[in-house]
Image (cartoon, rainbow, N blue to C red):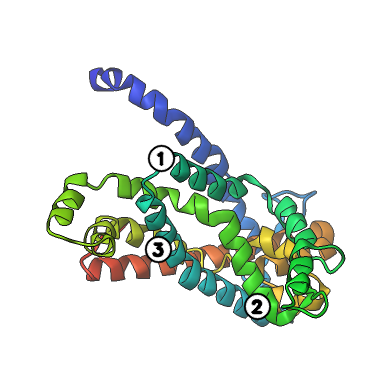
Amino acid sequence: MNKLYQQKWLIAFALPGFLFFLVFAYLPMYGVVISFQDFDVFKGVFRSDFVGFDNFKTLFDMPDFNNALKNTILISALKMILLFPATVVFALMINEISTGWFRKFVQTTSYLPYFVSWVIAAGIWYKLLSIDGGVVNDLLVSLGILKEPFYFLADKDAFYPIILFTEAWKNMGFSAIIFIASLSAIDVQQYEAARVDGASRFRQIWHISLPGIKNTIVLMFILNASNLLKAGQDQLWTMSNVTVQQKAEILDTLVLRYLKDMGLTGYSIGTAMGIFQAFIGLVLFIVCNYLAKAAKSDSII
């Protein structure tokens, strides 16, 4: 008890976080049972009939499931392969800015879009890329790059590049914060010693900055890999349209459309999808964590 009393302020700071996860993460977990039920909102969790794995079978037998699974993995993989290294490079570039006010300006303007919802962000990009007065089309036509306005968001070949670009615009600055914080923890004497030895800026980045944040990169990659089946529901839902539906349909939007059509009878399917995504994410998390350990780098567990 004496030890608890001595750490009362530490416990007080941890208490809000503990309550948050207890209320919004652990208590709702009892609801996963409805994925094995023919859930009826009027009967509730305790009186609905159990149907075993029928909901999972219904989910996997959906006509568009394979296409949605393929799109989900493809979009997530593209984001991980292209945007994750780009975020590290962006953090390194910000770290190299020596002018204080300019560094703050770049940081602030880069992470502000993170606080804008995808509904607003999609509206902004629909307007910018519009064929009717869109800034991008007007600029490209005036420069002679395009002969006539091009409907970017309705072109299947341009859809994935736009998804990657808007994802980078919205989240790269905020995601880079943890790498910038990790870079700030590197002892500046290492850079001074490297400069004395004649190391260029690139050599300093390669031999000091990158090794200094190696463990952070590994940890963030493991966490990102566990979200392979979550390609960005809000982004794909708001930026897709009928023309690119075949390439934009992911698992989350597939279930959302199913729930929208089924009304109050589709909760069990939605929960089954959540369990499927969580199971795959857990497997990927364990595999990546094992590989990180095997490579004698850092790991989470």
**Label 1 Cα neighbours within 10 Å, binned few <14 / some 14-19 / many ≥20:** few
**Label 3 Cα neighbours within 10 Å, binned few <14 / some 14-19 / many ≥20:** some
- The residue type indicated by label 3 comes to Phe
Position of 167 with respect to 280 (left or right) is right
Residue 23 to residue 125: above or below: above
Residue with the mark numbered 1: 100
For label 2, the SS is: helix
For label 1, the SS is: helix
* Front residue of this view, candidates 100 and 237: 100
* Front residue of this view, candidates 5 and 212: 212
- Residue 221 image label: 3
The quarter of the rendered structure image containing the N terminus is top left
Image location (x, y in percent) of residue 207: 21, 63
Residue with the mark numbered 2: 60
Q: Earlier in the sequence, mark 3 or mark 2?
A: 2
Q: Where, by quadrant of the figure, is residue 7 drawn? A: top left
Circles 1 and 3, Cβ within 8 Å, touching? The answer is no
**Label 2 Cα neighbours within 10 Å, binned few <14 / some 14-19 / many ≥20:** some
- The residue type indicated by label 1 comes to Gly
